[in-house]
Amino acid sequence: MINIQRMMLVDNEHLYGPGKRLLTYLKGCSIHCEGCINPHLWSFDGGTPLSSDDILKILLDNNLDGVTLHGGEPLDQADELLKIVKDIKANGKTVILFTGYIKKELTGNRLKIWNLADIVVAGRFQLKKRNVYLQFRGSTNQRVYTHKGKYKNYKLKDGYTTAMFTIDENGDMDVNGFLTEDIAELMKNK
Ligand code: SF4
């Protein structure tokens, strides 16, 4: 079981990867980058447990391409996450991993997950290198690896930005993506 803050079905290649995907926000991050837009996900307390069976049912029932692992820091739950990633891959679905770590920091189960993922978006968010016009990344130091599988020859599409607005069942609005100044201003006044 992994512990998540929330999950949703998405179809936004620029932010979360190709195809229709299950986007999961894993709870907890030990890295604490300055300027992180998700500090509410740093705590490891609370959250909702999610199993391989739960994920596979959602993937198969909705005919999704795969799972996007976001955070928080997914690799801070590597011991539980590895089995889930293996199960997703064994069912022919793809895994896209967003991590604040770089490869040379990783060993053991963390490295195994990196090697199983179809796309890895890696590295700390660096406020002084922030750029909202990149695909997947929030700062120019972050790197994208399309080292295997279905997306091996994937070409990144930088040069524009995307934001995704969601409204939950309580009518509360949230925004995901890389916020230009005008969108950030809009959100302040929501
Ligand atoms: S690794 Fe990601 S979630 Fe963790 S502090 Fe950095 S940007 Fe935020």
Image: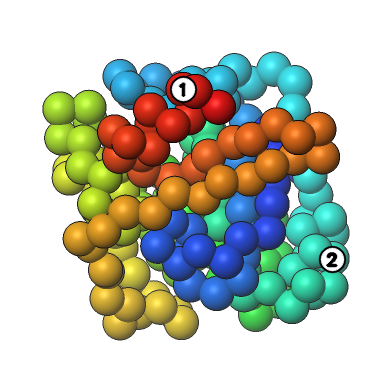
Give how far across and how far down residue 84 sits, in percent. 69, 56
Q: Of marks 2 and 1, which one's residue comes earlier in the chain?
A: 2
Q: Quadrant of the C terminus?
A: top right
Label 2 environment density (alpha carbons within 10 Å; few <14, some 14–19, many ≥20):
few
Residue type highlighted by circle 1:
Lys
Query: Which of 107 and 93 lies nearest the eye of the viewer?
Result: 93
Q: Nearer the viewer, residue 6 or 108?
A: 6
Q: Nearer the viewer, residue 174 or 32?
A: 174
Other residues around mark 1 within 10 Å, as few (<14) / some (14–19) / many (≥20): few
Q: Label 2 CB, ligand 1: below 8 Å?
A: no
Identify residue for label 2.
57
Q: Residue at x 46, y 82 (%)?
A: 150
Give the spatial CA distance, label 2 vs label 1: 37 Å
- Closer to us: 105 or 42: 42
Number of the label disc, if any, that sits on residue 188: 1
Residue 159 visible somewhere in the drawing: yes
Task: Please state if 92 lies on the left or on the right of 186 as rendered.
Answer: right
Position of residue 103 in the picture relative to residue 57 (left or right) = left
Mark 2 or 1, which is nearer the eye?
Answer: 1
Q: Where residue 88 sits in the image (x, y, percent)?
A: 67, 67
Q: Residue at x 30, y 19 (%)?
A: 34
| 140 relative to 65, above or below | above
Quadrant where the N terminus sits is top right
Identity of the residue drawn at 32% across and 77% down: 154
* Snapshot quadrant of residue 31: top left
